[in-house]
Image (spheres, rainbow, N blue to C red):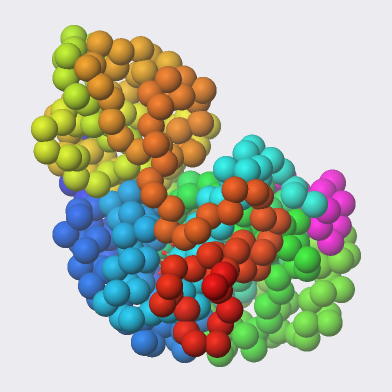
Amino acid sequence: MNRHQPVFEATDTPATGAGCAAVPFAASEAFAPTPAAARARLAAVRAGDYARSRNHLDGAVTRLSPYLTHGLLDLAEVVASLRKRHHLPLTHKLVQELGWRAYFQHSWRHRGAAIFDDLHPGPLPAAAYARELPADLRRGATGVPVIDQAVRTLYASGYLHNHARMWLASYTVHVRKVHWRAGADWMFAHLLDGDLASNHLSWQWVAGTGSAKPYLFNAENVARYAPPAWHSPGTVIDTTYAVLDALAHSPQRRGAEPGAHPAVDEPPLFAAPPAEGFTAPDAATVAGRTVWLVHPWALADPPAGTLPVAVLDTRWHARWPWSAQRWAFVGARMHAIASLRWMAPAPELVAALRPAAQVRGWYNPHLDDPAWAALRLPLPPSAFADPDRACRSFSAYWTHVLKHAPPGALPQGVLSND
Ligand SMILES: Cc1cc2nc3c(=O)[nH]c(=O)nc-3n(C[C@H](O)[C@H](O)[C@H](O)COP(=O)(O)OP(=O)(O)OC[C@H]3O[C@@H](n4cnc5c(N)ncnc54)[C@H](O)[C@@H]3O)c2cc1C
């Protein structure tokens, strides 16, 4: 890849090892960082097939997540558009899954940085889990085909089907005894849609530190929902749920198994874009102008009449480095919409914006440096009737949403407020 060219071409070389089936998706084709690609993806949604097939790796999932995470699509608009076009009630499975995203954001708003620690005890004391991923897992060479395929797909495409994320997280925590936080940080870094709320809270849900019980899966489950190359007969997961539950509650750690695929290299991570095109902030260029703030979670078209300024908070990215693919997605889009592109610690970015007549844009909780507060950016409108009080479970959250549903949003027989 030409590191100086802001184009979306980082994933033409899938990280498959010899002897492995090809990965199902190639990111360069699957996720172009443009509003047109996002709209095309939305138009292609097969809502009618979603509920029936969504657990299958080749099911009618939407692959909207990179566009939602980066603000190329707005959650409220997506929900409204899907409901209108497909006549979906709020109770439809696809709307409910989008509700999970909103719920995780709700949890992050109310719990703050607490989401990065165990929300409550899991099946074992936290000290029973390693804080590092074993090399064979990182390199897709565990000998459990479903895991090795998932790791390859993640590295090659930056996207994983929800079921594959659950399998990978469950194996990491409950079989290999790695603390969910180490797994979550690792997966986040390689996902194109990496979102700290959806990712870290989903890992907690699988680990059993954010849910009533650990999520477990066996070889039969994989055989039902994944293609043959993923099937894992004769491996540690080829057993009953009772045995897996006992393993999850035992400190006994299992290792790599014979017959592993050749290892793949983990793609490198970057704390700054691995391409040129970002400069130090320059207050003089924005003096007196109405600035539209473009940041990695707000990559939609800027409104007419504003001066788009793209910003990267170097301190944030040093804490949360990303893959080249994710940088390609974000960097290419920033180049397309903003001729001013600044990179600095958040306080310096905010200080340089001070001479602007006005700074507009959307707040996102990934902008976690206290300096951002001075800009007073609003949150995008809620997709659902978000409760003011913190809900400790999705079902409490969703009950509130349904209870406050607008007229006509529920099928007959489902109780709402009226
Ligand atoms: C361990 C683990 C890590 C995850 N990390 C992330 C992450 O970093 N970023 C992220 O956006 N999602 C994450 N998810 C949630 C979910 O897997 C993805 O949103 C989904 O797979 C994205 O693919 P899709 O757009 O095709 O989903 P679809 O099935 O088509 O769903 C449509 C949309 O609904 C939302 N959604 C669906 N399922 C979930 C869910 N379980 N939780 C939250 N929102 C959901 C997403 O916005 C998704 O784009 C994670 C799940 C697990 C189990």
Residue in the image at 25% along x and 11% along y? 355
Q: Which residues are magenta?
A: 121-132
Q: Is residue 302 above or below residue 306?
A: below
x 84%, y 46%: residue: 127
Q: Of 110 and 173, which appears nearest the observer?
A: 110
Residue 62 in percent (x, y) is at 36, 72
Question: Left of 192 or right of it: where is 100?
Answer: right
Can residue 263 be found in the magenta stretch? no
Quarter of the picture holding the C terminus: bottom right
> In the picture shown, does residue 408 fall above or below 397?
below
Q: Can residue 147 be seen by looking at this rendering? A: no
Residue found 81% across the figure and 57% down from its top: 122
Q: Nearer the viewer, residue 272 or 364?
A: 364
Which x, y percent locates residue 228?
A: 49, 87
Where's residue 48, x and y in %?
36, 87
- Total residue callouts: 0
The image position of residue 151, as x and y in percent, is 51, 63
Residue 408 visible at all? yes
Main secondary structure along the magenta-highlighted residues = loop
